[in-house]
Amino acid sequence: MSQSPLSQATDDRLSEMLFQGEEVEDEFTVEGARVAVTTHRVLVFTPNGEGRRFDHADRPNVLDANVETTGKGSYIEWSVRAGVYGVVFLGGGILLKASGVLDQLGATQPPEDAPGAGIAQLVSFLPKALGALTTVLLVVGGLLAIVAGALVALYFKSRERELVIERAGRDPMRVPVHGDDAEQVARRLRAAVGTSSKPRSD
């Protein structure tokens, strides 16, 4: 049976990465990635990945292997911030508009004995200023609410299934996976590592 392009591309590199006396016990190919379990380590090759193209962990340090659905958490963080500010701005604008302050100020007349024209100008300017502020609060609040919704949509779009290989003392190795066989690969990987977690002596 002919090898896959990924296997052909990584076979030479895999043999170069093996220690003296280290042998490959099991291999898995999932969605453009290749995972090899040797007598000493777990090796992960992702030649077309965005991050590290080769990663590894000593077998005693491999704790678990599971399939998780993850997304970019930064989208949710910024969405929450935009949503909170949007609620504050919208709430302020709605409160000003519903309070009737603008109507009351608009109906206010300066006292006849007020000195100079400054008081009259101030009284006539306040309703316009507060009206403009109300409009700004409503518009900015609405825009922030739209941004928050867009960020949530981006988060769901960024979600993908990953084969997560947990290892002690370091961040887990993550391999994007698609398809129903991902759970089976995770089980096989757990079995391969769990049944022989110590290097064989030659």
Image (tube, grey):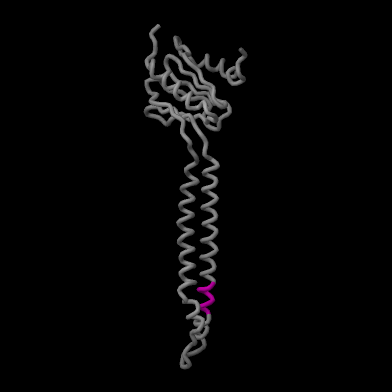
Find residue 180 and report its horizontal and vertical position in percent. 52, 28
Towards the viewer: 32 or 180: 180
Residue lying at 51% horizontally and 86% vertically, measured from the top left: 120
Residue lying at 46% horizontally and 69% vertically, measured from the top left: 95
Residue lying at 54% horizontally and 25% vertically, measured from the top left: 30
**Snapshot quadrant of residue 88:** bottom left
What is the tally of numbered marks visible in this picture? 0
Towards the viewer: 68 or 40: 68
> Which quadrant does the C terminus fall into?
top left
Find residue 200 and report its horizontal and vertical position in percent. 39, 10
Q: Is residue 129 magenta?
A: yes
Q: Is residue 61 magenta?
A: no
**In this view, which residue lies farthest toward the bottom?**
113
- In this view, 41 is above or below 200: below
**Snapshot quadrant of residue 99:** bottom left
- In this view, 96 is above or below 21: below
> Which quadrant does the N terminus fall into?
top right
Find residue 34 and report its horizontal and vertical position in percent. 53, 22
Prevalent SS, magenta region:
helix
Chain part drawn in magenta: 125-131
**In this view, which residue lies farthest toward the top?**
202
Left or right placement of residue 193 versus residue 12 in this view: left
- In this view, 81 is above or below 61: below
**In this view, which residue lies farthest toward the front?**
180
